[in-house]
Amino acid sequence: METAHDLSPLGLFLAADWVVRSVMLMLVLASIGVWALALDRALRFRRLARDARALRRFAEDGSPPSHDNAWAEVLVAAEHAAREVAGEPAGERRRHIASAARLAVVERTARARHGLPVLASIASTAPFIGLFGTVWGIMNAFTAIARSGNTSLSAVAPGIAEALFATALGLVAAIPAALAFNRLSAMLGEARGAANGAAERLARRLGLAGTGRARVAAE
């Protein structure tokens, strides 16, 4: 009488050999990492968008942003540039201030992007890692069948199920990673666009003022 096989996810993991187990464990950890990173970046990018809007309001009507505004360095760069060209014509002042503020936006955005390449890497590689585990598991299953000579479905099914479970885990990691990468890239793009708009308005405000003094703490 053939023994019953545990086809639950835990049972499939425990029944797999060490290579397939390693693949499964790697993919489970990658999936957890995807969700943690996506949530963290979503909260950060939402704050970037909110603070960019606050900076734009300040540039338009003087409403002071909070002392810990995420784009404070843009304002600092604009003020510094305004002081450097205080004696220049208004058009030249505005161009210089806008250039300095936009550069600060680029640098802040580049730092904010940290983590997104990880999501892209997981999205592109996790299916292939899972496929490797599947191929390895199927090879082991057929090797065991050849040694035992038992080709019944009940003998073949557990080994194939273990192998295919690795592919499923690869997709479980890759699909959320791809969706998160696309959504977060869009969120960061929106925040960057708002910050660039604020930079242009700051350049107009400080350029016309000549020696604007829009104070904000930059800690």
Image: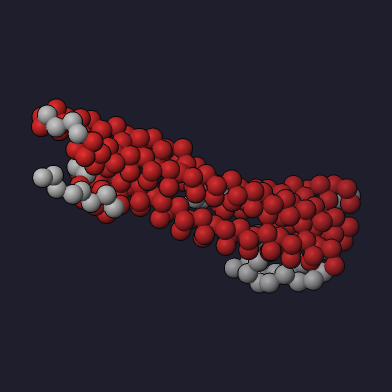
Query: Where 185 falls versus 37 (above or below)?
Result: above
Residue 47, position in %: x, y? 63, 63
Query: Where 143 falls versus 208 (above or below)?
Result: above
Residue 214, position in %: x, y? 77, 67
* Residue toward you, 61 or 137: 137
Which quarter of the rendered picture does the N terminus lie within?
top left
Q: Residue at x 71, y 60 (%)?
A: 52
* Residue toward you, 208 or 145: 145
Residue 67, position in %: x, y? 66, 72
160 displayed left or right of 87: left
Q: Residue at x 79, y 66 (%)?
A: 58
60 displayed left or right of 76: right
Residue 210 visible to the viewer: no
**Residue sticking out furthest to the front:** 1
Query: Where 129 falls versus 49 (above or below)?
Result: above
- Which quadrant of the structure image shows residue 45? bottom right
Q: Residue at x 14, y 27 (%)?
A: 146
Q: Residue at x 85, y 47 (%)?
A: 92
